[in-house]
Amino acid sequence: MPKTATKPSEAENDTRKLPAKNQRQSVSVRLSAAEKSLIESYAKAQRRSVSDVIRFVALEKIEAEYDLAWFVEAKRDHERNPGTVTHAEMMKKHGLDA
């Protein structure tokens, strides 16, 4: 993971700026009529709300990009230093000592 992606922002460290835990916030998104219709149709087919569908898709996209960043970093590390490492070594490298 890129180092900047793992560091919390100042806003995250200042609890006065964050909503209460589990409190939902709303976001407005501008869509064309066709985009709105497509999302509504998909949500209906999935028996989910439009809000749930948009939330799920957005978070999945972000997670996929983080996963890709981890992969690219791991591939780069392996190309620089080919070989194998144990599970314990990998956990230690990423600060996940068990």
Image (cartoon, rainbow, N blue to C red):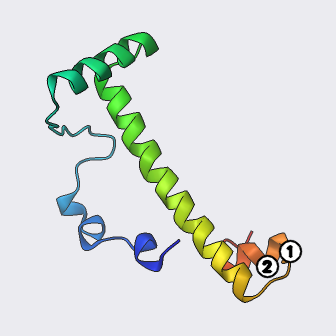
* Numbered mark located on residue 72 in the image: none
Dot 1 falls on a residue whose secondary structure is: loop
Contact? badges 1 and 2 (CB < 8 Å): yes
Residue 65 % position (x, y): 47, 57
The answer to whether residue 2 is left or right of residue 11 is right
Answer above or below: position of 24 versus 96: above
* Numbered mark located on residue 86 in the image: 1
Residue at 18%, 61% (x, y): give it: 16
Residue at 53%, 71% (x, y): give it: 1
Answer above or below: position of 41 versus 83: above
Q: What distance separates the C-alpha of mark 1 from that of mark 2?
A: 5 Å
Residue at 37%, 42% (x, y): give it: 58
Q: Which amino acid type is shown beneath numbered disc 1?
A: Thr
Answer above or below: position of 33 versus 17: above
**Figure quadrant of residue 10:** bottom left
**Figure quadrant of residue 51:** top left
Mark 1 Cα-neighbour bin, 10 Å: few <14, some 14–19, many ≥20: few
Evaluate whether residue 27 shows in this view: yes
The C terminus appears in which quarter of the rendering? bottom right
Residue 73 % position (x, y): 59, 75
Mark 2 Cα-neighbour bin, 10 Å: few <14, some 14–19, many ≥20: few
**Figure quadrant of residue 86:** bottom right
Evaluate whether residue 94 shows in this view: no
Q: Which amino acid type is shown beneath numbered disc 2?
A: Glu
Residue 43 % position (x, y): 37, 18
* Numbered mark located on residue 89 in the image: 2
Residue 23 % position (x, y): 27, 39
